[in-house]
Image (tube, rainbow, N blue to C red):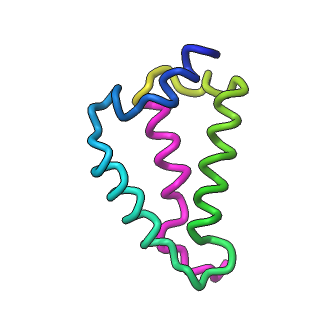
Amino acid sequence: KLQHRQYLCDFITEFHIPLPTLCNFLRAIESDHLPANPYHNSTHAADALQTLFSLLCLGGSSYASSPLELFGILCAAVCHDMGHPGRN
């Protein structure tokens, strides 16, 4: 568990992601969540990301075997409702 937790928090170093690039990526994701949508909005994205991160830290990281897979899972969580019109 600790090994997974360590690289859950070190993607910037692991993948050589410049901090401004990561910030711009996250801002782009946030701007594509429709603010008028009462549920599928950026707050929901942050909640989904935090919930998934907590589950991974509690042992769910066995669902991914590498830092890249874990990073992909977390990116999917924050992106999963981008542009969702909120009609269903």
- Residue 86: within the magenta? yes
Q: Position of residue 63 (x, y in %)?
A: 59, 27
Quarter that holds the C terminus: bottom right
Point out the residue furthest to the front here: 20
31 in relation to 76, above or below: below
Residue beneath the point at 32% across and 45% down: 19
Q: Position of residue 24 (x, y in %)?
A: 32, 58
17 in relation to 65, above or below: below
Q: Position of residue 2 (x, y in %)?
A: 61, 15
Q: Is residue 63 left or right of residue 15?
A: right
Of residues 24 and 40, which is closer to you in this image? 24
Q: Which residues are magenta?
A: 69-88
22 in relation to 35, above or below: above
Q: How many marks?
A: 0
Q: Is residue 66 left or right of residue 15?
A: right
Residue beneath the point at 29% across and 51% down: 20
56 in relation to 76, above or below: above
Q: Position of residue 15 (x, y in %)?
A: 31, 31
The answer to which quarter of the image holds residue 39 is bottom right
- Residue 56: within the magenta? no
Quarter that holds the N terminus: top right
The answer to which quarter of the image holds residue 71 is top left
Residue beneath the point at 62% across and 65% down: 43
Residue beneath the point at 36% across and 54% down: 23
